Image (cartoon, rainbow, N blue to C red):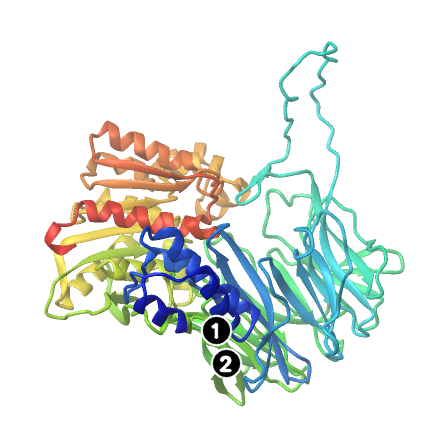
């Protein structure tokens, strides 16, 4: 607030004054953040005058922070959490570890600086932590920190980052996963080139079905393997070497074996979800499968008494969505039992209660993050709600929690007015401990969020949505509306913060977002209403939502706009092929032609099998019937395409097809390509800014001047 007052009362700050004021702040982290705020103004203002508004602006994206991965100490007295922030000068996301008492006192950083420290895990005695960081030389290493002295040392020093580290029960050893490259021979043998000749690089020989992945590009040969390491340091011991990825390793209580998740089946490329829980014997490195049903079994966690394993999974019937259940079995692989079947909701994460007689579990229900306790008979007790806040751009439900030995809980608390903050739960009483965006939201007004329900015109099913009104909203005025559609399509929006939606509202739009049929959090039957039938009647759910918003009385029905990304991009393109009621549309990272998508996206073994009944050449008519490309002849709506150039999930070729088709139809159209971006466009802060700026520029172009 000192910075704001000074900027509003004076035209210029000298560099000396900036340094003096920054050193007056309580710690190095806040001082650095303070300096960045000044740099933003100096960089983007030619007059160096703080022309601040009371509404959210595009550059405020760089000031948004959020809490993630809260890890409560074994005795429940302290919590380590990850505080995530952005660097406007380098366009990077950074994070540091912070420590706070359970009662909210003594909040302070454990790491500082513009790097990434994350994945902290307490030792069982609460005296040490391990964590990952790249602060030394930009190589991510596994570190050990003694909590009494705050001294730390690097346990690994390789060029490849470790991940998923876990303590042994006696706190003397660690287990973790790490990618191990392997050489792959090429069938193509080039002759030796003449001395001094300048030839092109050798041809790349590929014979794997999955040869590229979104966010990674073309995959290097190799796999995630399991390693063990003494906390005294030394050389990690590689425990697995198969041509499969190994995930989520945990020690047995006697340290004689390690439990892990993998798909070691011979047909794994064609059955990508068929993972099992395995036991690795450390005496002879033999591997035994503890699960055997067809379907994904994953993320095993050992009970405190060392007698049982909890894990997540489902029987795979190739449906578009299957509810992920919480199972318990004996450590020898016997007596498998689902304890969450009655919920009809997908369990997202779980943790054992201290007495080994039950578990805590997190799931989404009608747009709200829930935390419950389940005993081993399946009886549930709600512990807390409003878990969320980990999705900064769009209002997806995502959260994290941990449990102490005395059943205290640390969790990320979400809400429509803020991204994730840290909260605790004790005897069902929730206490919010942090307000990491108070420096921004103390003077920025956000749009107010209202929950809505309506009946779909096609079958009267109840549909849930949310309406955001602009800051300084006047119910007597008429506002343009943006319909914003989630991706997935099996996903869920909720009562959580969204930077994109709030920026739309700050620009003067009412924003409608919702969970049409196919969304998760409403049970398996509701999600699978679009099984082998997407897009279709979800269109009517969305149009009924627009009608509901108009009925509120303050939406100008002549100023309707529509956008969505991924699955939301599919539906946006579908909508404009079926109605002309929208003034303009932005189709982000869509699927336009299901035939090309299934054969070109990064997981061909999955999409054709779960989203269609047959391969493209076996049922081309059905693929085309569900493709927005088939309805491009109906489109009159001015349309922008927006996709990352490195997107391998919904490759940019999908957007290029639609762009060419719109041009051939002489529809007003444009294409925005985000260089270097994958499917997660907003993984770099400036890309989130670019996405919102592009959408608003296109919509403003077709918005009457008097309404801007």
Q: Is residue 696 left or right of residue 316?
A: left
596 shown above or below 157: above
Identify which residue is drawn at 66% across, 38% down.
220
The C terminus, quarter of image: bottom left
Q: Is residue 66 left or right of residue 638?
A: right
Residue 463 can be seen, yes or no: no
| Measured Cα–Cα span from mark 1 to mark 2 | 7 Å
**Foreground pick, 503 / 440:** 440
Counting other residues with Cα less than 10 Å from the Cα at mark 2, is it few (<14), some (14-19), or many (20 or more)?
Answer: some
- The label on residue 421 is 1
> x and y percent of residue 609 in the render?
50, 45
**Foreground pick, 433 / 326:** 433
> x and y percent of residue 57 in the render?
32, 59
Locate residue 126: give its quadrant: bottom right
- The label on residue 433 is 2
Q: Is residue 699 left or right of residue 659?
A: left
Q: Is residue 264 left or right of residue 462?
A: right
The N terminus, quarter of image: bottom left
Identify which residue is drawn at 39% across, 48% down.
566
> x and y percent of residue 387 in the render?
47, 74
């Amino acid at each position: 607030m000192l910075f704001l007052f000074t900027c509003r009362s004076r035209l210029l700050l000298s560099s000396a004054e900036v340094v003096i004021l920054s050193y007056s702040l309580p710690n190095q982290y806040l001082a650095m953040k303070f300096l960045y705020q000044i740099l933003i103004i100096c960089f983007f203002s030619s007059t160096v005058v703080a022309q601040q508004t009371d509404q959210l602006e595009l550059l405020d994206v760089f000031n948004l922070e959020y809490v993630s991965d809260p890890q409560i100490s074994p005795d429940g007295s302290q919590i380590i959490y990850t505080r995530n922030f952005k660097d406007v000068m380098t366009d990077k996301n950074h994070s540091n570890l912070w420590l706070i008492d359970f009662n909210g006192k003594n909040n302070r950083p454990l790491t500082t600086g513009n790097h990434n420290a994350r994945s902290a895990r307490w030792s069982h005695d609460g005296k040490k932590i391990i964590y990952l960081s790249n602060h030394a030389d930009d190589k991510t290493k596994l570190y050990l920190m003694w909590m009494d002295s705050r001294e730390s040392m690097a346990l690994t020093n390789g060029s490849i980052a470790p991940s998923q580290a876990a303590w042994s029960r006696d706190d003397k050893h660690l287990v973790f996963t790490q990618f191990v490259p392997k050489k792959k021979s090429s069938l193509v043998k080039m002759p030796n080139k003449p001395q001094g000749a300048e030839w092109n690089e050798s041809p790349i020989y590929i014979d794997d079905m999955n040869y590229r992945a979104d966010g990674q590009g073309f995959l290097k040969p190799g796999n995630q393997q399991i390693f063990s390491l003494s906390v005294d340091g030394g050389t990690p011991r590689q425990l697995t070497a198969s041509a499969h990825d190994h995930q989520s390793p945990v020690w047995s209580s006697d340290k004689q074996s390690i439990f892990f998740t993998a798909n070691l089946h011979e047909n794994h490329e064609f059955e990508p979800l068929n993972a099992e829980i395995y036991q690795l014997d450390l005496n002879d490195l033999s591997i035994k499968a503890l699960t055997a049903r067809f379907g994904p079994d994953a993320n095993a966690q050992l009970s405190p008494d060392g007698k049982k394993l909890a894990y997540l999974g489902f029987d795979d019937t190739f449906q578009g969505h299957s509810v992920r259940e919480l199972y318990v079995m004996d450590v020898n692989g016997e007596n498998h039992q689902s304890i969450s079947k009655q919920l009809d909701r997908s369990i997202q994460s779980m943790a054992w209660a201290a007495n080994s007689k039950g578990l805590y579990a997190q799931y989404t229900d009608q747009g709200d993050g829930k935390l419950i306790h389940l005993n081993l008979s399946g009886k549930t007790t709600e512990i807390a709600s409003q878990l969320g806040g980990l999705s900064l751009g769009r209002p997806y439900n995502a959260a994290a929690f941990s449990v102490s030995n005395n059943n205290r809980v640390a969790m990320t608390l979400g809400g429509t007015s803020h991204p994730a903050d840290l909260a605790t739960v004790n005897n069902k009483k929730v206490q919010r401990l942090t307000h990491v965006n108070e420096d921004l939201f103390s003077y920025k007004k956000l749009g107010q969020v209202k929950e809505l329900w309506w009946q779909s015109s096609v079958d009267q099913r109840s549909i849930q949505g949310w309406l955001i009104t602009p800051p300084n909203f006047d119910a007597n005025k008429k506002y343009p509306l943006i319909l914003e559609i989630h991706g997935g399509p099996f996903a869920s929006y909720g009562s959580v913060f969204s930077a994109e939606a709030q920026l739309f509202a700050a620009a003067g739009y009412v924003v409608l977002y919702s969970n049409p049929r196919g969304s998760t959090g409403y049970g398996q039957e509701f999600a699978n209403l679009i099984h082998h039938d997407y897009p279709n009647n979800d269109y009517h759910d969305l149009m009924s939502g627009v009608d509901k918003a108009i009925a509120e009385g303050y939406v100008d029905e002549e100023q309707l706009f529509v956008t969505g990304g991924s699955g939301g991009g599919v539906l946006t393109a579908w909508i404009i092929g079926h109605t002309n009621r929208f003034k303009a549309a932005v189709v982000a990272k869509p699927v336009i032609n299901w035939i090309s998508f299934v054969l070109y996206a990064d997981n061909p073994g999955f999409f054709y099998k779960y989203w269609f009944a047959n391969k493209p050449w076996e049922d081309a008519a059905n693929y085309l019937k569900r493709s927005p490309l088939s309805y491009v002849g109906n489109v009159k709506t001015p349309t922008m395409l927006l996709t990352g150039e490195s997107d391998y999930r919904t490759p940019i070729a999908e957007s290029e097809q639609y762009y060419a088709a719109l041009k051939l139809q002489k529809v007003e159209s444009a294409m925005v390509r985000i260089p270097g971006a994958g499917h997660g466009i907003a993984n770099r802060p400036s890309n989130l800014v670019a996405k919102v700026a592009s959408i608003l520029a296109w919509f403003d172009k077709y918005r009457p001047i008097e309404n801007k």
